[in-house]
Amino acid sequence: MAEILFHHYPLSPFSEKVRRVLAYKQLPWRAVEQPIMAPKPELTPLTGGYRRIPVLQIGADIYCDTALILRVLEQRHPTPACLPAPLAGAVSLLEDWADHRLFMQTVPPTIVRLLDQLPPAFFADRAAMTPAFTCESLIAGAPHALSQALISLDRLETQLRQTPFVLGDTFTLADAACFHPVWFMQHGGDLFDVVRARPALAAWFDRIAAFGPGMETMAAGEALAVARAAQPADVLGGHADRDYPVGDEVSIVPDDYGLEETRGRVARVSADEIVVLRADPEVGDIAVHYPRAGYRISRV
Ligand SMILES: N[C@@H](CCC(=O)N[C@@H](CS)C(=O)NCC(=O)O)C(=O)O
């Protein structure tokens, strides 16, 4: 089976969401480090434009967005399960809350404490992704964001006093999603005291943080060579779709921030996923997979 290549950078919260699941499942994986800012010349040949992190690569199949990445890992490596069928709906609902709401509450107060460690061009890069994300607006918005984060942490604490994980006795993707915004707060120094002050939340955090490592690294150039040597392998199946027929060219753009576009010919469509085929001068034939939730798809 082709190796799991995971394009990430250490400080990326969404990467941590996936890293925890890889660790829980004890999967071997290769970490391909990408820059924290655009341009990403050794990533965008694979995605066709998408610059967000993380991205999963299996040969010449490229999976964008953690919601899809985690479901692909679950399908390929079902044991131990992180998406039990009776909880699948609740997991996705909680994941959406954590990835958008909790994330946006914890990022501003953490970033303002990291200001002197970030590269000077960081804010210009992020403002290009999200117009409201300037240094000034972040500083101005941090106190309110933190007050909202504390309410969310209280809610997690309330639940975790009842059950060891957010949806019961075992770790699920909902825990991974709630974990990464809380994990990011660790980078804010004593900001993390607000987590330590909530005993059930702190115990949950330590339990998940303790899932073992298990990765080796790979240079980004080597990952491009892997794609070049492979052919897309995960493109069959799906349903006939009136809006996006197989073979038609479509454009795919996130509907929240980082609005870079991927264009390609539809290979497969299902209720949750769309796969497009591209031919790239650097990596040859490549399949790019997106979740449908959170992405605008239009025919070109
Ligand atoms: N919905 C996306 C969000 C990914 C995201 O926002 N990633 C951040 C890093 S944690 C990002 O790409 N920031 C800009 C960058 O790294 O260039 C997902 O679940 O993968």
Image: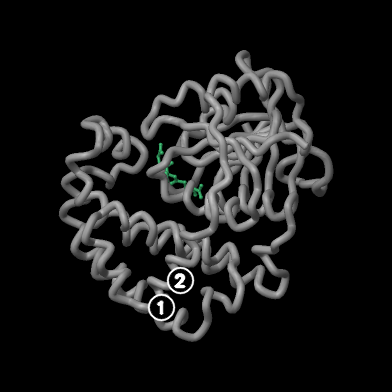
Name the residue at 35% across, 72% down. 153
Q: Amino acid at mark 2?
A: Trp
Which type of secondary structure does the marked residue at label 2 adopt? helix
Q: Give the position of the C terminus as an image quadrant.
A: top right
Residue 200: mark: 1
Q: Position of residue 23 (x, y in %)?
A: 58, 53
Considering every residue shown, the one lying at the far top of the view is 281
Which type of secondary structure does the marked residue at label 1 adopt? helix
Q: Position of residue 196 (x, y in %)?
A: 31, 70
**Quick check: 199 above or below 214?**
below
Name the residue at 51% across, 34% down. 50
Q: Which residue is mark 2?
A: 204
- Whether tag 1 and tag 2 are in contact, CB under 8 A, the answer is yes
Q: In which image quadrant can residue 145 be found?
A: bottom left
Q: Give the position of the N terminus as an image quadrant.
A: top right
Q: Is residue 298 visible?
A: no
Q: In which image quadrant can residue 6 be found?
A: top right
Quarter of the render that holds ligand 1:
top left
54 vs 251, left or right, is left
Considering every residue shown, the one lying at the far bottom of the view is 162
Mark 1 surroundings: few (<14), some (14-19) or many (≥20) residues within 10 A: many
Residue 265: mark: none
Name the residue at 59% across, 36% down. 30
**Quick check: 245 above or below 197?**
above
The residue lying toward the viewer, choosing from 10 and 152, is: 10
